[in-house]
Image (cartoon, grey):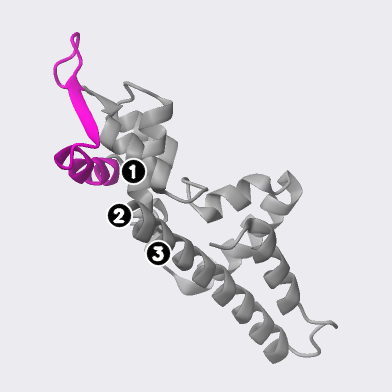
């Protein structure tokens, strides 16, 4: 698997040596960068699934459960920035495969507390880093000013796409 530095070096290699002279040329440069970004993310998730045997989003869920023993489904959803039903759907197969145990809360029988099992820990050890996914990891390294600028610029693109905004709560590695 490529390191973050290798990915950064590849991105820098795609940068134009000069500023694009037209909108068409600039559009092609941005398209190449987006392809590189999406294909790198897809490649990371393929590598995770190949080595860990489960989807990247499930690996992330396992890592949250490992770091927060007794976490509930709602807290897991918040930690992963996904809808509660998405978090539930992510953990069902993990429970069925014996990677996670869901115990009922003694005080509130409706609530469950999740714990990782030895089998789940073994899967996490096989998974290539970062277990949260390469994109969240890289974004966490950017400074606030860059993140704010990126947020504004992506909002302009999203505004033109007109997507179903609920898709923003679906993990890429699912």
Q: Give the CA distance from mark 2 to mark 1.
A: 8 Å
14 relative to 161 in the view: left or right? right
Decide: is 116 above or below 94.
above
Residue at mark 1:
123
Residue 16 versus residue 101 in the image, above or below: below
Query: Whole-percent x and y of residue 135?
Result: 54, 55
Q: Can you tell which of label 2 and label 3 is closer to the viewer?
A: 2
Image point 41% across, 37% down: which residue? 63
Q: For marks 1 and 3, give the CA distance.
A: 15 Å
| Secondary structure of the residue carrying numbered label 3 | helix
Q: Position of residue 173 (x, y in %)?
A: 38, 57
Circles 1 and 3 in contact, beta carbons < 8 Å:
no
- The answer to which quarter of the image holds residue 6 is bottom right
Q: Is residue 171 visible?
A: yes
49 or 160: which is nearer to us? 49
Q: Which residue is mark 2?
A: 53
Report the mark closest to the observer, 1 or 3.
1
**Mark 2, residues whose alpha carbon is within 10 Å: few (<14), some, or many (≥20)?**
some
Disc 2 + disc 1, Cβ < 8 Å: yes
Q: Which mark is residue 2?
A: none
User: For mark 3, what is the residue?
Assistant: 46
Which residue does the image show at 26% across and 46% down from the upper left?
Answer: 90
Identify the magenta region.
85-110
Residue at 33% in and 57% down: 174
Question: Can residue 134 be found in the magenta stretch?
Answer: no
């Amino acid at each position: 698997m490529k390191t973050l530095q290798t990915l950064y070096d590849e991105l820098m290699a795609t940068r134009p040596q000069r500023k694009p002279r037209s909108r068409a040329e600039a559009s092609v440069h941005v398209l190449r960068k987006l392809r590189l970004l999406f294909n790198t993310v897809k490649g990371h998730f393929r590598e995770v699934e190949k080595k860990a045997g489960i989807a990247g989003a499930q690996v992330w869920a396992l890592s949250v459960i490992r770091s927060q023993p007794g976490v509930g489904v709602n807290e897991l959803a918040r930690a992963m920035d996904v809808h509660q039903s998405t978090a539930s759907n992510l953990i069902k197969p993990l429970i069925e495969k014996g990677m996670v145990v869901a115990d009922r809360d003694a005080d509130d029988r409706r609530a469950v507390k999740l714990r990782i099992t030895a089998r789940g820990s073994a899967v996490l050890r096989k998974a290539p880093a970062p277990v949260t996914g390469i994109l969240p990891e890289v974004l966490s390294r950017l400074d606030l000013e860059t993140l704010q600028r990126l947020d504004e610029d992506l909002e302009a693109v999203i505004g033109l796409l007109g997507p179903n905004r609920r898709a923003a709560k679906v993990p890429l590695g699912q």
